[in-house]
Image (cartoon, rainbow, N blue to C red):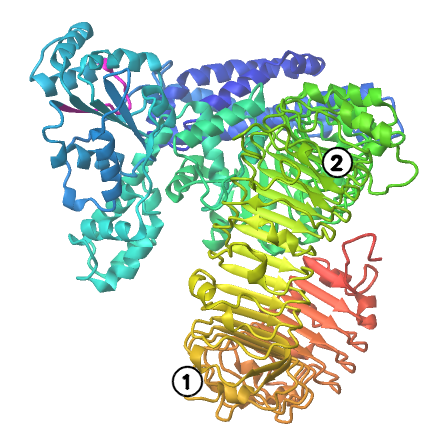
């Protein structure tokens, strides 16, 4: 099977189309290059005719494989050249049509040669033409030498020889399929009411997951004996041959047959099955043609009702074609079952009891296999011949996963790849850019495919289809963590890397495996996992990849921020002349170089979550750009003036750009846009609301802002939102200021005129100034609405009718100051028995300052208003609400009430599902128990805050005993609360600022987390009852506890890992003999004014990793080397007495990674030891913070051995003027300097340190980045 280059045919086909472009040939005719392109096309056509033969032969002949590799490399270079010539043609046309000759864009374009021959000469086109011509002729000449034949049938059209699976299985060797077996047997034995006498049961799963094995188990189960008159098994495999399959089944049910005609075969099979209840298995079906299945199934219709056909397939599409029954999806094995399967095939037993020394390695093996049965069995068979742990380790760490001949799993998965259409092959191979377990977004991947030129007309729709096809074929699977994202199974990921060949490089793999010297210069796609700090060294080899098309950082940490050295931005990125997909997403970038406009091939440009305030005007020259992502660029205030030059732009994502309040009118000419996430209405020369008229292709979501600038209702009507059915989410936003310039009537008319299409799924209206909402909001024709939000519509006194919207799931109402009453109009005309808000799951009311009454369905009615599916209800800052109906919330799981009257709680009934309850500033609340008609007994987490009248929680023994699910209680700022004896058995208790609280619960045996802050009346003498369960203990400020007595006992606090003591006035010393906390990992002591000494025997706290001691001025027994725990990783000492640094022997603590010293050495001048042969600090340090050292002048000598240092923070050192020597800052990734004026002067752009620190990814001086041109001189 051809792997790595089999999709070349699709690439060549597209390239042939580009070479035949009439427009391009016309442009090149004056130079004579058009004749060269025509010649190349003829040669490529000849090569294309033998391409299939070459792909079939490449696994047998290395010379053919090399020929294909050279051809692919040439095809990429030729494609880049054609794109360069096309781009020049487009740029010249833009120049000719540009009337603004003085614009910056025009100045940039004017650098292009006016004469075509000059352009060809200056850009080195002639040398490229000659090189490509020679290489193409050489490849053509090799065709005969390699004996390549024209018009050979493709390998995907012919089934390769492989072993077909049968119905035989050894049940004792099958693991983890008990439930699946029971489910499938139930489906086979149940009688269904159906028009058809036969039911088709499809089983779908990825290759190697065990579909065939499961059906084998069921097929041979004793419970089926007597249930079916006839049983037959046919392995359909890759080639769907109706004649062959029919013959196999006929032979199984009636004996031998020698018919050679399909019609006769089907007649005889129909006779054999007539009035018989049968079970037929069609294993491994790939065929997607309904006509073929329709022919095959005809004899089966003669069977007796209750007959069943089981179909196994990897393709959801096949399942849907063959059956109306939902497919049964087979999942991966559990960890234990996969391990048992490995033991079975490697040791011949079901467990590792006979070889416990191999168990942990076995676990690693099944993890590597991702619990895929076929992979586990394959590795088990190999490991059967390996006896020692070293041999098993060798297999685990070997390259067996990508070895074509030694592993069965890759051939199984390659078969799936083998039968992909050519256009899907290249799309899948591109996915090799994704590291294992990386979650990717569908639309983002489609954008990347589009940028690569994999998609033709209707590009996004075609890309969606390709993606869905790969998903149904199990190449992709939905993420279990995020339903909107997708992942590839590790073995599928390996397959992608295998088939992508040399074209794709994951930078992390190269650096990890030290493969710099082995990497081909022909790399086309580069991806890498974003690091928090990115140094130049990581990218030093990128400039050798002259033809790179993709430069893609990938974040494994969501929307985290990262820092990229300026050298990469200035020296590496602008030289990626062939790049088509470029992302700098999430990097803290303040400005881009204007040379970014030289990246003329660029199609996809992701700058989301950067700190850019504007883009260089040269971006307007990127005429090939299709996707520009500026999402969440919070500082962005300006787009390039000539955005209209981006004639191919299809997606402009500027969501979350709060500072962007003006958009140039040129954007109105980008009528091919499908994504325009934000549209700012200009007051003067920018976009007008009626410019939306021509954006007929818009999809997804749009936020239309600054609507107060619309002064003509007709302009709003002309926006024609009703004609944009693919816009499913719309935000309509006016300005926050409600002054005399606002016109209530005009804004009502404008909102009415902006009526969207009825397919709308989400509507948000903010700062609207009309006195009411137009009638279309809440109209029943908007039946697809799932989310509605009204924010600070301060003039509206009523809400629209929303209660009958059938799909509404999320409703939020905030800051509507004029609403005093919510009445029946909110629900609509409800008939008897009709449900209100039938789908509503999340309901929020916030900041309703004048809201007083909430009516039910009828005035004074006693019947409850039931919202059956409501899961989360937040009602906050509604202080005047005192009249409510009775509500029934049977599905409510989370309730948050803040700054409301207790009557709000009185109205809520039937809280049988409530697990999360938060109450904040509830006026009049004295007892939590008393406000509920029926107390929510399923509570898991309870939080109450700032309830001044609260005296008790739920003073009932009966309630306490029934709160069996309660795990966490948090009580804050309840000054009258005396006791919390009644909370029951919980795991976490947080008590803060409860001045009258005198005692904790008697039963504390289950406490894992205990936090007590500022409770001066609390009396507690022991924690012995929770000594074995307590994991985290925090005590802070004004707590009447004797820590010595609490800790001094015969009990060993073996579970306690974190102890924090903050501002504890009563702590003078720790228990004699040290802390009875052998597993303590984190000790924090802060603001203990009278504390005289640290715990004794701290050197025995072998598990302690973090030690922080702040503001303990009375420490008389200061730090000394014998009192420092030996395995510390993180140490902070601030404003405490400390022995001289040279006496601490910190240089011996090689586990120490982070050190902070603040206000501890006021006399320190030089950061060095008197004895130059001994260093002060350990070489393991990665982070060092020095602060408030008023006499410190230099750091040089003390840093000689800090070769691992990556982050250095220097604060409040007014005399410091010298950094360490230049070569000792080589590995530094972050430098922060604050209130160090002498050092600051040397580190600014004109200072002598600038050349030393300019490559550091993050440098901040007085809290401002030196790379921010506005904040740092």
Asked whether 971 or 496 is in front, the reply is: 971
Residue 341, x across and y down, in percent: 23, 49
Q: Residue at x 56, y 87 (%)?
A: 1042
Q: SS for tag 2?
A: loop
Residue 61, x across and y down, in percent: 33, 30
* Start-end of magenta stretch: 231-242
Q: Is residue 540 at all visible to an observer of this figure?
A: no
Q: How crowded is mark 1: few (under 14 residues within 10 Å), some or many (20 or more)?
A: some
Residue 862, x across and y down, in percent: 59, 42
Q: Residues within 10 Å of mark 2 (few under 14, many from 20)?
A: some
Q: Which residue is drawn at 27% across and 23% down?
A: 200
Q: SS for tag 1?
A: loop
Q: In which quarter of the image is residue 91?
A: top right
In the rendered image, the quadrant that contains the C terminus is bottom right
Q: Is residue 936 at all visible to an observer of this figure?
A: yes
Sequence-first disc among 2 and 1: 2
Name the residue at the right extreme. 740
Q: Which of marks 2 and 1 is in front?
A: 2
For residue 232: magenta? yes
Q: Is residue 94 left or right of residue 184?
A: right
Q: In this view, does 1100 lie to the left or right of 1218?
A: left
CA–CA distance in space, label 2 to label 1: 64 Å
Residue pointed to by mark 2 = 798
Residue pointed to by mark 1 = 1051
For residue 1197: magenta? no
Q: Quadrant of residue 261?
A: top left
Asked whether 686 or 561 is in front, the reply is: 686
Q: Which residue is drawn at 70% across and 56% down?
A: 899
In the rendered image, the quadrant that contains the N terminus is top left
Q: In this view, does 904 lie to the left or right of 961?
A: right
């Amino acid at each position: 099977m051809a792997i790595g280059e089999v999709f070349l045919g699709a690439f060549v086909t597209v390239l042939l189309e580009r070479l035949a472009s009439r427009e391009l040939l016309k442009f090149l005719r004056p130079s004579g290059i058009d004749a060269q392109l025509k010649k190349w096309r003829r040669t490529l056509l000849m090569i294309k005719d033998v391409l299939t033969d070459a792909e079939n032969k490449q696994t047998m002949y290395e010379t053919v494989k090399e020929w294909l590799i050279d051809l692919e490399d040439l095809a990429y270079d030729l494609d880049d050249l054609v794109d360069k010539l096309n781009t020049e043609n487009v740029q010249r046309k833009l120049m000719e049509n540009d009337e603004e000759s003085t614009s910056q864009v025009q100045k940039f374009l004017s650098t292009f040669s006016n004469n075509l021959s000059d352009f060809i000469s200056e850009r080195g086109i002639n040398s490229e033409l000659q090189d490509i011509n020679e290489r193409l002729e050489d490849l053509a000449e090799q065709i005969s030498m390699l004996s390549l034949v024209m018009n050979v049938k493709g390998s995907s059209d012919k089934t390769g020889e492989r072993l077909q699976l049968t119905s035989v299985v050894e049940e004792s060797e099958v693991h983890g399929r008990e439930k699946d077996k029971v489910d499938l047997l139930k489906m086979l034995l149940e009688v269904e009411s159906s028009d058809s006498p036969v039911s088709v049961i499809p089983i779908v799963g990825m290759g190697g997951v065990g579909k065939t094995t499961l059906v084998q188990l069921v097929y041979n189960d004793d419970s089926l004996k007597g249930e079916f008159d006839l049983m037959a098994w046919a392995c359909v495999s890759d080639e769907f041959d109706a004649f062959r399959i029919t013959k196999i089944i006929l032979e199984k049910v009636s004996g031998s047959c020698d018919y050679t005609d399909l019609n006769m075969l089907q007649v005889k099979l129909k006779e054999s099955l007539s009035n018989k209840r049968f079970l037929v298995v069609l294993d491994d079906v790939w065929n997607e043609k309904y006509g073929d299945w329709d022919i095959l199934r005809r004899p089966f219709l003669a069977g007796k009702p209750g007959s069943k056909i089981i179909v196994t397939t990897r393709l959801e599409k096949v399942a849907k074609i063959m059956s109306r029954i939902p497919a049964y999806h087979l999942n991966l094995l559990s960890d234990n079952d996969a391990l048992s399967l490995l033991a079975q095939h490697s040791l011949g037993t079901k467990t590792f009891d006979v070889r416990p020394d191999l168990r942990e390695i076995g676990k690693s093996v099944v993890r590597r296999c991702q619990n895929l049965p076929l992979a586990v069995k394959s590795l088990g068979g190999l490991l059967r011949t390996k006896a020692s742990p070293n041999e098993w380790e060798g297999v685990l760490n070997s390259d067996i996963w990508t070895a074509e001949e030694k592993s069965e799993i890759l051939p199984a998965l390659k078969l799936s790849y083998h039968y992909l259409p050519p256009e899907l092959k290249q799309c899948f191979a591109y996915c090799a850019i994704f590291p294992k377990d990386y979650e990717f977004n569908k639309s983002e991947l489609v954008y990347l495919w589009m940028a690569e030129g994999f998609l033709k007309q209707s590009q996004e729709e075609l890309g969606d289809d390709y993606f869905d096809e790969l998903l149904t074929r199990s190449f992709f699977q939905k993420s279990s963590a995020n339903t909107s994202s997708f992942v590839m199974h590790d073995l599928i990921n390996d397959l992608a890397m295998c088939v992508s060949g040399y074209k794709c490089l994951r930078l992390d793999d190269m650096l990890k495996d030290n493969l710099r010297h082995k990497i081909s210069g022909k790399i086309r796609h580069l991806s890498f996992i974003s690091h928090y700090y990115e140094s130049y060294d990581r990218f030093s080899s990128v400039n050798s990849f002259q033809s790179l098309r993709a430069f893609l950082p990938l974040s494994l940490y969501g929307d985290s921020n990262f820092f990229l050295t300026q050298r990469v931005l200035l020296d590496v990125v602008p030289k990626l002349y062939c790049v088509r997909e470029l992302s700098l997403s999430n990097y803290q970038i303040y400005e881009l170089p204007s040379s970014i406009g030289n990246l003329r091939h660029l199609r996809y440009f992701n700058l989301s979550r950067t700190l850019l305030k504007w883009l260089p005007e040269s971006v307007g020259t990127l005429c090939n750009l299709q996707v520009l992502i500026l999402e969440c660029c919070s500082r962005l205030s300006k787009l390039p003036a000539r955005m209209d030059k981006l004639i191919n732009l299809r997606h402009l994502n500027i969501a979350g750009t709060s500072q962007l309040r003006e958009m140039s009118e040129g954007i109105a000419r980008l009528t091919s846009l499908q994504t325009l996430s934000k549209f700012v209405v200009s007051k003067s020369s920018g976009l007008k609301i009626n410019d939306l008229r021509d954006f007929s292709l818009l999809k997804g979501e749009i936020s239309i802002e600054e609507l107060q600038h619309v002064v003509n209702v007709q302009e709003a009507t002309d926006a024609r939102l009703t004609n944009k059915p693919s816009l499913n989410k719309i935000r309509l936003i006016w300005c926050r200021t409600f002054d005399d310039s606002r016109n209530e009537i005009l804004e009502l008319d404008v909102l009415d005129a902006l009526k969207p299409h009825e397919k709308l799924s989400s509507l948000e209206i903010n700062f609207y100034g009309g006195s009411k909402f137009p009638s279309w909001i809440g109209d029943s024709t908007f039946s697809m609405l799932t989310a509605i939000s009204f924010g600070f519509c301060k003039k509206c006194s009523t809400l629209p009718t929303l209660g009958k919207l059938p799909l509404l799931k999320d409703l939020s109402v905030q800051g509507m100051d004029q609403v005093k009453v919510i009445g029946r109009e909110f629900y609509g005309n409800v008939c008897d028995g009709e449900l209100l808000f039938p789908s509503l799951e999340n309901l929020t009311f916030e900041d309703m300052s004048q809201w007083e009454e909430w009516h039910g369905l009828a005035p004074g009615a006693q019947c409850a208003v039931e919202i059956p599916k409501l899961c989360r209800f937040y009602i906050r800052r509604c202080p005047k609400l005192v009249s409510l109906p009775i509500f029934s919330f049977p599905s409510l799981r989370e309730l948050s009430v803040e700054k409301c009257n207790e009557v709000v709680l009185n109205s809520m009934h039937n809280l049988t599902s409530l697990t999360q309850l938060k109450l904040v500033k509830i006026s009049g609340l004295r007892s939590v128990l008393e406000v509920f008609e029926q107390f929510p007994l399923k509570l898991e987490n309870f939080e109450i805050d700032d309830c001044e009248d609260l005296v008790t929680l739920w003073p009932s023994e009966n309630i306490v005993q029934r709160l069996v699910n309660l795990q966490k209680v948090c009580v804050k700022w309840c000054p009258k609360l005396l006791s919390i004896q009644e909370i029951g058995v919980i795991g976490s208790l947080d008590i803060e600022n409860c001045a009258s609280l005198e005692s904790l619960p008697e039963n504390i045996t289950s406490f894992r987390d205990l936090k007590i802050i500022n409770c001066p009346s609390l009396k507690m003498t022991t924690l012995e009852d929770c000594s074995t369960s307590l994991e985290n203990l925090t005590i802070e400020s004004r707590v009447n506890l004797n820590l010595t007595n609490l800790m001094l006992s015969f009990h060993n606090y073996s579970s306690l890992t974190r102890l924090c003591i903050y501002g504890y006035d009563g702590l003078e010393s720790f228990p004699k003999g040290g802390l009875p906390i052998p597993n303590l990992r984190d000790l924090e002591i802060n603001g203990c004014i009278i504390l005289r000494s640290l715990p004794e025997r701290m050197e025995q706290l072998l598990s302690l990793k973090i030690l922080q001691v702040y503001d303990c001025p009375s420490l008389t027994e200061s730090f000394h080397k014998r009192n420092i725990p030996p395995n510390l990783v993180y140490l902070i000492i601030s404003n405490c007495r400390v022995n001289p640094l040279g006496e601490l022997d910190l240089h011996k603590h090689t586990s120490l990674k982070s050190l902070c010293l603040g206000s501890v050495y006021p006399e320190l001048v030089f950061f060095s030891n008197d004895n130059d042969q001994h260093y002060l600090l350990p070489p393991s340090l990665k982070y060092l913070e020095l602060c408030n050292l008023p006499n410190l002048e230099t750091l040089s000598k003390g840093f000689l051995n800090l070769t691992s240092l990556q982050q250095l923070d220097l604060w409040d050192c007014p005399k410091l003027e010298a950094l360490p020597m230049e070569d000792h800052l080589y590995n530094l990734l972050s430098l922060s300097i604050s209130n160090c004026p002498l050092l600051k002067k040397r580190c600014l752009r004109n200072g002598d340190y600038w050349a030393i620190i300019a490559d550091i990814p993050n440098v901040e001086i007085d809290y401002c980045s030196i790379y921010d041109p506005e904040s740092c001189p």
